[in-house]
Amino acid sequence: MRWLIAGGDLRSRALAGIAAENGDQVDVMGLPGIAGASAISAVGDEPYQAVVLPLPVAERGGRVPTPLLKDDPGLTPDMLSGALSATVWGGTPDAALIRAVSDRGGRLVNPNDLEPYAIANAYLTAEGAIVSALARYPGALQGADVLVVGYGRIARCLARLLAAWNANVTVCARRADSRAWAEADGCKAVPIGALASEAERCAILFQTAPAMLVDAYVIAGMKPGALVSDLTREGVDFAAADDRGLDAWRDSGVPGKYAPQAAGRVLYDIIKKETEKWTQM
């Protein structure tokens, strides 16, 4: 199997190493030297079975991030255009990349749309989010009041891991079935309307719902010094958190930060499996 792995974090670097170790042909762009892989500056004519871009793909004006390179110069769709006729893997692509892949006749796949990957990635995200919080929290998780906002895949993994550490876990979720699942998982569950009152007493808040829910009103009642981890792109009013004296941060690309080798393995396994399946069709 022939890969092009372009840009990305330590997870992308791990993926390239795993593919090379398994005897695959691996080209890399926008990544530092990797044993067994070929660093290229331009795409040739030989086709790829998989082109892997970061998760998320583009964050700065359509440029694919290259955070492992000095000054993060990024890659543009034009630099990759010769490879975009393949199956292109990447998360939350922008309009420019979607158009570039379509123009080249390629297929764009977000790994998070595949349930086996999404579940495995959610666990790694939850584990990393807890590690990140513990590095900031002066107390112990055992007995700590922890609030999890939302109850999707990541939140469910978070709640179960936190409960295993004997934290007092409350889940705040909009849907009644989500709250029922949270209670079945051994957590206290409350509706979104109770978010502000529950936030008042929590020591750590994990925001996983893709909406601005931890806003200035919610933050105004929180205890100064409380921790707020935003695992979304838009879920926390950071200006209000700073004014209130909260330790608030956005955790993005968590698996690539805290478990890159495991994250690379998960990505390798799903891409290899899906590519073999499509080849046989």
Image (spheres, rainbow, N blue to C red):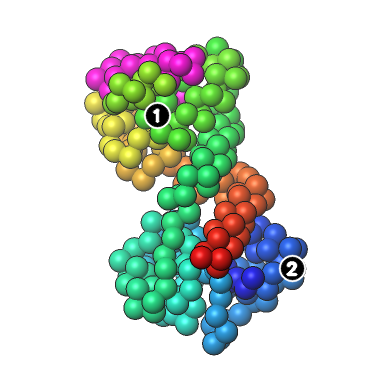
Residue 223, percent across and down?
Answer: 39, 19
* Disc number for residue 151: 1
Assess disc 2: are there few (<14), some (14-19) or many (≥20) residues with their C-alpha within 10 Å of its C-alpha.
few
Identify residue for label 2.
23
67 or 259, which lies in front? 259
At 38% from the left and 61% from the top, the residue drawn is: 93
Q: Amino acid at mark 1?
A: Tyr
Residue 174 visible in the picture:
yes
Rendered location of residue 245, percent (x, y): 39, 28
Element under disc 1:
loop
CA separation in Å, label 1 and label 2: 40 Å
* Residue 183 falls in image quadrant: top left
Q: How many callouts does the rendering have?
A: 2
Can residue 227 be seen at all in this image of the molecule? no
In the picture, residue 64 is in which quadrant?
bottom left
Give left or right: position of 56 versus 3.
Answer: left
